[in-house]
Amino acid sequence: MKYLVVSVIMTIVLGLFAFKAAEENVKSQSEALAGIDPNQEYVTYRVNQNENGYSFARQSYANKITEKSAEKTLPNKHFQLMVEIDSRDASLYLPDNMAFPLAYRPAIYEGNKQTKETIGYIPSKVRTGMNESRLVFLDGLIYNLTQYYGPEKYWVWSVSVPKGYGKEAGAEEETGGKKKKMSLKDKLKAMKDMATSGGDAATKKLVSEDAIGKLEAYMKAAAAKQKKVEAAWANSKEGKIYIEGMKLKRDAWAKFVRKDREEYFNSEEYRRIVENNRLADAARAESAKSEVVIKNTGTQSICVSHSGGSRSISAGGSASFKCDMDISYCNGGLIVGADQHCGGTVTIQ
């Protein structure tokens, strides 16, 4: 019993030491991005979770980085990315934390050209929620996370792997630095392998190397390190200057928006728009006075004749007609006479 207790204690201690080592060695996302070529081509796999774990389905589109450049507020430390996700147009991604980012987030730089040139760039605030997403770059892979609430609560939507990852089965293979055309026999064998093994070579590598498990381990270690690094950074000279500067910039932009809004509401342009809206409302009201609404409360469509033409009103529907002429049923019978019920509603069924 004594040896069992000692063994359990040793296992716990070793586990803590292992996690501590992983935490110390974990890289921030900006460090990971420093070694990524923005021209790298990727293949994207949709991630599906079931009772047997995770499966991967290759997509027709490929997520990719279209631009990687210095981030505007801490250019020597972080990056700003333009990334195409799920076949959508490229959008801006910024670090989720300026001290130690464990992911990159969709963002914008607030302000207009004038404020950006004067007070500087202002990254939009970090949010979490159902519609939030994150990108994580790990071991050359790009993980697209959705429904992100934090490093322990998110959904892995897809993972993008470098082209050639796991030596994908395809029409060509690398041999001695030269491309060799696969024979029909080799192609059929590759197709059979995919069918029997549950996917292509990249899929098998994602499963065998536990790509999702690696992501979960990274997020756990990175979150612990972020918490520690952020506290120290916030008290550092750089951190204090950045935090205070960002507060001043946000306050300045808020005042600029308020001032700009007040000036606009007092402008001649705004008064012209208000007057135009008033005239448009009056014209619509005047037009309504010269019309009568026919409402069908029955269970079938009804054909209505007016001004030499006909119109069908569906069950529960209604239609407007000029009230200067008689309105009748198509098969005969007056509904309402000319100049009667103008501006009102007549019910039929």
Image (tube, rainbow, N blue to C red):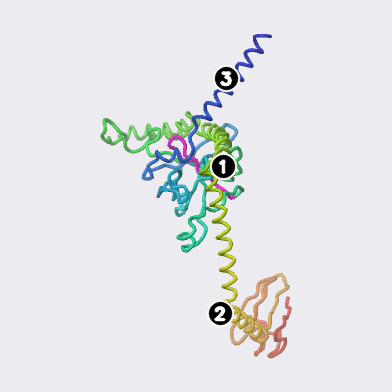
* Label 2 to label 3: alpha-carbon separation: 74 Å
Which circle's residue, 3 or 1, is located before the other in the chain?
A: 3
- From this viewpoint, which residue is outermost toward the front? 237
Instruction: Specify whether 190 is left or right of 297.
Output: left
- Residue under numbered circle 2: 268
Q: Inspect the image, locate mark 2, and give the three-letter code of the amino acid beneath it.
A: Glu
Q: Is residue 241 above or below residue 210?
A: below
Instruction: Decide: few, some or many residues near mark 3? Use Cα within 10 Å; few <14, some 14-19, many ≥20.
Output: few
Confirm or deny contact between disc 2 and disc 3 (CB under 8 A). no
* Label 3 to label 1: alpha-carbon separation: 32 Å
- Residue under numbered circle 3: 14
Residue segment shown in magenta: 131-143
Where residue 322 appears, x then y in whole percent?
64, 86
Q: Inspect the image, locate mark 1, and give the three-letter code of the amino acid beneath it.
A: Ala
Q: Quadrant of residue 149?
A: top right
Is residue 243 part of the magenta span, yes or no?
no
Comparing marks 3 and 1, which lies closer to the viewer? 1
Where residue 97 appears, x then y in whole percent?
54, 44
Which circle's residue, 2 or 3, is located before the other in the chain?
A: 3
Instruction: Specify whether 123 is left or right of 291.
Output: left
Work out which quarter of the rendered image holds the C terminus and state it.
Answer: bottom right
Comparing marks 1 and 2, which lies closer to the viewer? 1
Instruction: Return the mark for residue 234.
Output: 1
Confirm or deny contact between disc 3 and disc 1 (CB under 8 A). no
